[in-house]
Image: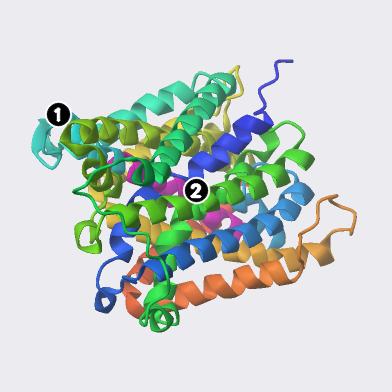
């Protein structure tokens, strides 16, 4: 039988690629806005929040390692929450993964690529053009085109998709390392480099503010791919060893890169230049390399973001595939071709992603994604206390490092973030609830016919 599993390196590439993407290249623009508008405009506070985000994700990775190797199925939170709580909760999680978690993330990555490509193309990507009688911005046309291209690449098989993923991830890490080092090696007398990241008088008040906690939404979205391997755990070689290695190793690598990259960005560009902007990489590249080479790096940034979208196209369909196996009503989306690829699941994900590109904005997608994904990750981590009682002690050879303190830290930090964000912007909490409720209702409608 043909081996269609992902190797350890391909699985690690998938996790790193899921994490490094739109979030780190765009979040800083919304963190440096004025404090009264919900920002945290302080260099020390910004680096601290990226470090805390990495530590929270690491605590989640420790916990997920035990849960994933105990339950031993692809599908991520859909499988875990169904077994630990109730199938309706798992189905709601799968629903969110389908319409928001992956499709929304793919859509936001596509929009970011459309924005980043502007200097390289030398055009205004906000300009409207007619497509099949509908007026769309060039940014959205670019996003839709890339979604279709990468979806068809991954229809070819896990081996080809794995090679593409590993290459794109290595390329993106190389780009980040260049940006981390460039400010210290490029001699430009007209570009002062600021490396003052020490605490200021404002740092303490910012760190203990609601704005700091709510800013974690952007950070945790940037880290949200740390659990990507659990969606394909049934398709990786030697999952007992691979899953913990990928979860923990990927999170540590990305935490180091995130802190370094944000420090590099802030050493080159001022808060005023970055405030409210999505394409921080473009701003820094133009300042570092000038108009000519800045345009080249714009194209490179766009290409690097392909890796993020590609990784999500790999992981996302495995959730809808599991739903199709469990519910006959959705059986069609679980059908695989001869290469073991869930063809209909990939096509459905691409369709939903395109719809979100058409009708959503970048900021709306990121904030809704950050909240809803954090909520289901919170429920999953709480589940470690259930799994310890429900399953034999030797059900998995992998145990949560630092138990019970690491899961408790993840739980408290996530609640702190959600509550703080709700106090500042209650509407986004409402959007998240409205996205979750249809999933629960659909479950009760179809479960009698499907079971």
* Residue that mark 1 sits on: 132
**For the point 36% across and 36% down, which residue is it?**
351
From the top left corner, tell me how far across and down residue 86 is, in percent.
66, 62
Mark sitting on residue 257: 2
Residues 273 and 264: in front is 264
Depicted 136 relative to depicted 30: above or below: above
Which of pointers 2 and 1 lies earlier in the amino acid sequence? 1
Q: Point out the stretch of residues depicted in magenta.
A: 87-111
Q: Tell me if 122 is positioned left or right of 340 in this view.
A: left
Mark nearest the camera among 2 and 1 is: 2
**For the point 48% across and 25% down, which residue is it?**
154
Q: Bin the neighbour count of mark 1 within 10 Å (Cα to Cα): few under 14, some 14-19, many 20 and up.
A: few
Depicted 55 relative to depicted 202: above or below: above
- What secondary structure is the stretch in magenta mostly built from? helix
Residues 358 and 92: in front is 358
- Label 1 near label 2: C-beta < 8 Å? no
From the top left corner, tell me how far across and down residue 368 is, in percent.
38, 60
Depicted 15 relative to depicted 436: above or below: above
From the top left corner, tell me how far across and down residue 10 is, in percent.
60, 30
Q: Bin the neighbour count of mark 2 within 10 Å (Cα to Cα): few under 14, some 14-19, many 20 and up.
A: some
Q: Quadrant of residue 326?
A: top right
Q: Is residue 183 magenta?
A: no
Is residue 437 among what the camera can see?
no
Residues 303 and 417: in front is 303
């Amino acid at each position: 039988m043909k081996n269609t599993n992902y190797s350890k390196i391909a699985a690690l590439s998938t996790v790193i690629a899921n994490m490094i993407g739109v979030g780190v290249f765009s979040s800083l623009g919304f963190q440096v806005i004025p404090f009264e508008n919900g920002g945290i405009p302080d260099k020390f506070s910004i680096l601290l929040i990226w470090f805390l985000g990495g530590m929270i994700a690491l605590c989640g990775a420790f916990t997920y390692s035990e849960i994933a190797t105990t339950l031993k199925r692809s599908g991520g939170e859909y499988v875990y929450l169904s077994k630990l709580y109730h199938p309706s909760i798992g189905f709601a999680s799968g629903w969110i993964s389908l319409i928001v978690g992956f499709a929304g993330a793919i859509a936001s990555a596509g929009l970011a690529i459309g924005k980043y490509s502007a200097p390289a193309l030398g055009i205004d990507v906000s300009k409207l053009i007619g497509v099949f009688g509908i007026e769309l911005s060039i940014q959205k046309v670019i996003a839709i085109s890339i979604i279709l291209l990468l979806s068809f690449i991954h229809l070819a098989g896990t081996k080809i998709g794995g090679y593409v993923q590993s290459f794109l991830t290595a390329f993106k890490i190389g780009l980040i390392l260049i940006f981390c080092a460039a400010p210290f090696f490029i001699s430009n007398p007209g570009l002062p480099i600021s490396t003052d990241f020490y605490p200021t008088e404002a740092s303490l008040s910012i760190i203990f503010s609601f704005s700091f906690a709510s800013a974690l939404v952007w950070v945790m979205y940037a880290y949200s791919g740390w659990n990507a391997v659990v969606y394909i755990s049934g398709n990786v070689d030697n999952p007992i060893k691979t899953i913990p290695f990928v979860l923990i190793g990927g999170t540590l690598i990305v935490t180091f890169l995130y802190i370094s990259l944000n420090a590099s960005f802030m050493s080159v560009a001022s808060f005023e230049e970055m405030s409210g902007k999505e394409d921080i990489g473009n701003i820094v590249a133009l300042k570092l390399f000038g108009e000519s080479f800045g345009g080249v790096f714009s194209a490179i940034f766009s290409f690097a973001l392909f890796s993020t979208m590609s990784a999500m196209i790999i992981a996302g369909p495995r959730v809808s595939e599991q739903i199709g196996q469990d519910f006959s009503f959705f059986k069609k989306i679980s059908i695989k071709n001869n290469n073991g690829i869930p063809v209909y699941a990939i096509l459905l994900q691409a369709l939903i992603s395109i719809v979100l590109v058409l009708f959503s904005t970048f900021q709306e997608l990121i904030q809704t994604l950050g909240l809803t994904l954090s909520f289901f990750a919170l429920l999953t981590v709480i589940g470690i206390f259930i799994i310890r009682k429900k399953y034999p002690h030797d059900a998995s050879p992998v145990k949560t490092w630092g138990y019970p303190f690491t899961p408790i830290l993840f739980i408290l930090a996530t609640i702190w973030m959600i509550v703080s964000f709700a106090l500042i912007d209650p509407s986004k909490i409402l959007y998240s609830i409205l996205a979750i409720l249809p999933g629960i209702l659909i479950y009760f409608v179809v479960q009698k016919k499907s079971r």
